[in-house]
Image (tube, rainbow, N blue to C red):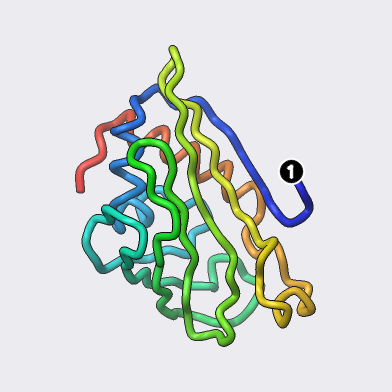
Amino acid sequence: MTTERIEIQRTIRADPASIFAVLCDPQGHVAIDGSGMLMDADGDIVTAVGDRFVVHMDREALGDIPMGEYDVTVNIKTFVPEREIAWTILGTIRPAIGHVYGYRIEPTDAGSLVTSYYDWSDIDPKWREAGIFPVIAETSLKSTLGILARTVRRGYLH
């Protein structure tokens, strides 16, 4: 792990397909969000690189920057069915920041080893100079994995 990437792992007692289904659904992202910023989403279930959906955000949950409510477009950059999904976001800020969020899923005897990652190694130089990263804390990634485990255990419904 570098200082420009956070990775958190958790074994979840569910098959990769069940976990991946949540991660492909825009509403699934809202359902498992541990940061408290994702309020709602619009768009279809993603099926390929280049697919997009809109997430309605509220930055007040972090209590750091008074941005209030705003929308971002999630752009899928990596899509390997039942194994990995990753995306960048485009919001109102320009130039686009360029940070990447994603999940890797590995089947295990106990279910699935899920790695949540947040990578800002290729962000636009303007944002690197601003010194604001990481925006999302490691604890938010841990919380999200816990909520994901609970969500698939209870039977996620779209």
Q: Position of residue 28 (x, y in %)?
A: 32, 51
Horizontal side, residue 96 vs residue 85: left or right: right
Q: Could you tell me which secondary element the residue under label 1 belongs to?
A: loop
Q: To which quarter of the image does residue 93 belong?
A: bottom right
Tell me what residue is drawn at x 45 percent, y 18 percent: 108
Horizontal side, residue 58 vs residue 98: left or right: left
Q: Where is residue 9 in the image (x, y as percent from the top left)?
A: 58, 34
Image position of 104 with respect to 102: above or below? above
Along the line of sight, the residue nearer the viewer: 8 or 38: 8
Q: To which quarter of the image does residue 30 belong?
A: bottom left
In the image, what residue type sits under mark 1? Met
**Would you name the residue on which mark 1 appears?**
1
* Quadrant of the image containing the N terminus: top right
Along the line of sight, the residue nearer the viewer: 126 or 11: 126
Tell me what residue is drawn at x 59 percent, y 65 percent: 99
Q: Position of residue 46 (x, y in %)?
A: 28, 56
